[in-house]
Amino acid sequence: MTLWRLEWLRLIRTKRWIVLLGVFLFFGLVGPFTARYIGEIVSFAGGGAQGISIEFPPPVPADGLAQYSSNAMQLGTLVAVIVASSSLAFDAIPEMGIFLRSRVSEVRTILTPRFVVSTVAVVGSYFVGVVAAWYETWVLIGAPDAGAVMIGAAYGAVFLIFAISLVAAMSGRATSVLGTVISTIVVLLLLQVIGVVEVVGRWLPTHLAGAITALVAGDTSSTHYLGTVSITLVACVVLLWIATKLAEHREL
């Protein structure tokens, strides 16, 4: 059995693919629904008590995608990081690390299938959520521009690939799956904080997380993100190189 087949079977038999798909699909279905009925939801929850009336502007297609993007790029990314960490931190259990390393000549032989399978699972689940959010937005609110949705989704996928590349790099030093998850989340949060400075933030990978919302709303053009995509892809290559070097020199 090859390591590629082993990794696919591990993803399927541990039901991790169900967790990933379920999270993104859930947000894809709930996001547009929340955007459409936010007024009714707030009123039902008691938002209009004591004579206070809260009025929301009529929803537009961008609102449905914005709800999905916000949840997918926060909670969805967290789940993706956890699932990817459980795969890429193969040295977290020393016995497993020794077993795998003793059967290959290069550590990248172990790392590559785990990174690729995790990436395909995460990005595939994200796209399923995008399709669900686009369809429900079209049904409940109105048809968003299909081209903007596809391009924005592609940019969002690049951000998720960066997040998984970061997991790979962090797993080279972390001593556990939990340590890999925490260190990855901390870096992503720091990038978010730094991104508050607009002149810097527009070049950071985290800037791509909100691309689908901005493009569907017509707030910016698709070419606005090309520089960020280039930087992010280069960062992914560098992170994977770091991950390989750290794994090669790691002492078990």
Image (cartoon, grey):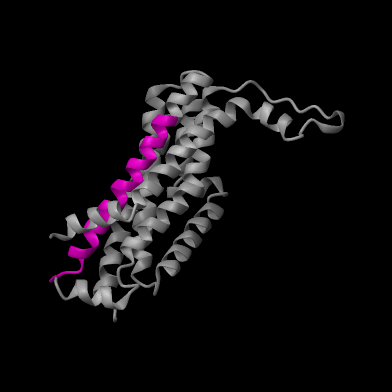
Q: Is residue 109 magenta?
A: yes
Vertical position of residue 72 compared to residue 163: above or below: above
Q: Quadrant of residue 41?
A: top right
What is the residue that sits farthest to the bottom in this orientation? 251
Asked if residue 249 lies left or right of residue 60, the reply is left
**Figure quadrant of the C terminus:** bottom left
| Image spot of residue 75 (x, y percent) | 50, 49
Q: Main structural element of the magenta stretch: helix, strand or loop?
A: helix
| Image spot of residue 5 (x, y percent) | 17, 55
Of residues 31 and 115, which is closer to you in this image? 31
Of residues 167 and 94, which is closer to you in this image? 94
Q: Quadrant of residue 223?
A: top left
| Image spot of residue 32 (x, y percent) | 53, 29
Residue beneath the point at 52% across and 23% down: 61
| Image spot of residue 36 (x, y percent) | 59, 25
Q: Which residues are magenta?
A: 104-132
Can residue 57 be seen?
A: yes
